[in-house]
Amino acid sequence: MPKELEPNQDLKINAGLVGMWKKAGLRVKSFKATKKGHNEIWAGKFKTKNAILQMSVNKFGFVFYHAGNKSVNIGRLDKQRKIIDWMKAIIRNAPWAESVNERKLSSQQKKAILIAIEMSGNMTGATKKIEKIKKGLSKDKKVRDALQLANESVNEDIVRDEVHAKTKRELKAAIAKSMKEILQGKTPKYDIINGMTGEMIGWKDGHDYIWQPSAIPYAERELK
């Protein structure tokens, strides 16, 4: 059993998590403490430009990310690298996420990328709508990448019980779909597995979905 943390470390924990979100690529604008649950020593909500991130830390130092009625253990406070990897996975796949470098996008690019996300799976329709903003905007590199990713995430076949991702494309599609379901308060019904090594990346455990954050960057390096 892990050693219990000392109580009254709210400021230290808060600052640590803000720093981890920043390293992962997300700007936290404000924080609001919330009521602590059973065995929790810290609980609160981080506000960013487009989202509110609810988190908590139990007395053993395990950090939980809450989405809807689902909670996911994303690692211990003393294992920051694993937590940051998991945070990066959220930012890559959540539709609300904004990058630390978001200010480099023009207002037209931002509108176009949001359209690509909202119309996932309808690349033709999204392209036409984006072109109404400005002719040629759909060919902009950042917009084109957003269109392609949104289309891939929907078109990949990942409805089976196990997803043996054999390419980076399959891995990203599986993570994107599972994160979308979690953010909607659902529990994905399939396991995500590194198709090269067989290592588990995410799996269903009862009503919870468990992630192994450290497995994601390894899989991205191994898969083509």
Image (cartoon, rainbow, N blue to C red):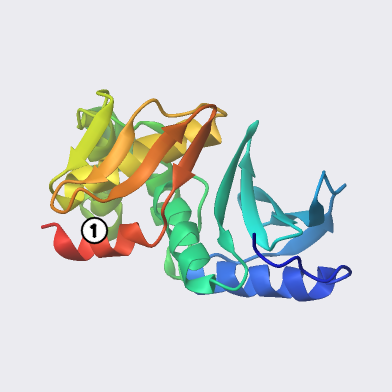
Q: Is residue 179 visible?
A: yes
Task: Check disc 1 and give the amino acid type.
Answer: Ala
**Residue 79, quarter of picture:** bottom right
Identify which residue, 88 or 223, lies in the foreground: 223
Position of residue 87 measured from the top left corner of the image (x, y, whole percent): 50, 59
Identify the residue shown where x is 46% and y is 55%: 91
Identify the residue shown where x is 24% and y is 36%: 151
Position of residue 77 measured from the top left corner of the image (x, y, whole percent): 62, 68
Identify which residue, 176 or 222, lies in the foreground: 222
Q: Is residue 51 visible?
A: no
Q: Which residue is mark 1?
A: 219
Identify the residue shown where x is 23% and y is 35%: 163
Q: Quadrant of the N terminus?
A: bottom right
* Drawn side of residue 182 relative to residue 176, left or right: right
Mark 1 element type: helix
Q: Is residue 180 above or below residue 102?
A: above
* Drawn side of residue 175 relative to residue 32, left or right: left
Q: Is residue 61 above or below residue 139?
A: below
Identify the residue shown where x is 14% and y is 57%: 223
